[in-house]
Image: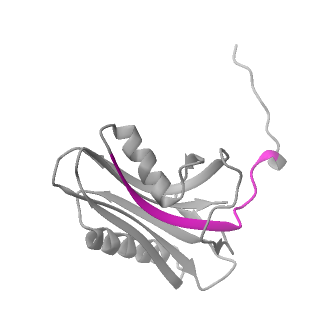
Amino acid sequence: MQEVIQVSATALPRLARFCTAGAGVGTSAFELLSFDRALRQAGFSDYNLLRVSSILPPGVERRPHINVPKGALLPTAYGVFSSCEEGRTIAAAVSLAFPTDAHAIGVIMETEGYMTERDAHDTVASMAEEAMEDRGLRIARLEIVAVEAQVELYTTVFAGVALW
């Protein structure tokens, strides 16, 4: 028989008050190490990332650096792509669409793959505009973080938005 655990609403995490965006590239003979190096360059390597869907909480403020204890669980929306196909171009990008209404949600859109930084940038911009339009929200500010790399050994590109 399976144990049923009851969780009260007070046990649910609060809404994030801040967000931090970053992007990075990592290269190594080991795929996992290339991922870790990309996280390090982006400023996300010393946390346990929890991948989340792409919603900015109402009133969230952008901060340049993450300010939570090292090793903490960190809700993050991100795009990541690794390849060992020498010479190929790979990219990752995230966009943050902040609404005109401070009490409304915003969106985060992410992409990654065999593409240029410009293609990744344009893709996440279009996705954010469409997602906000779908919700009947207007964009006050659209920010984009993107990165591109030429593959050598294992190369990983990462772009993410941490919510804390």
x%, y% of residue 139?
A: 52, 83
Relative horizontal placement of residue 58, taking residue 149 as reference (left or right): right
Residue at the far front in the pictured view: 28
x%, y% of residue 112?
A: 33, 58
| Type of colouring | one colour
Relative horizontal placement of residue 140, taking residue 145 as reference (left or right): right
Q: Residue at x 23, y 44 (%)?
A: 84
Q: Is residue 15 magenta?
A: yes
- Image quadrant holding the N terminus, namely top right
Relative horizontal placement of residue 94, taking residue 90 as reference (left or right): right
Residue at the far left in the pictured view: 87
Of residues 17 and 86, the one drawn nearer to the viewer in this rendering:
86
x%, y% of residue 75?
A: 60, 53
Of residues 76 and 129, the one drawn nearer to the viewer in this rendering:
76
Q: Residue at x 50, y 66 (%)?
A: 108
x%, y% of residue 154?
A: 28, 44
- Image quadrant holding the C terminus, namely bottom right
Relative horizontal placement of residue 40, taking residue 59 as reference (left or right): left
Q: Residue at x 24, y 44 (%)?
A: 153
Magenta region:
11-27
Rendered position, 101 above or below 31 = below
Q: Is residue 12 magenta?
A: yes
Of residues 27 and 14, the one drawn nearer to the viewer in this rendering:
27
Of residues 101 and 160, the one drawn nearer to the viewer in this rendering:
160
Q: Residue 92 appears in which quarter of the rendering?
A: bottom left
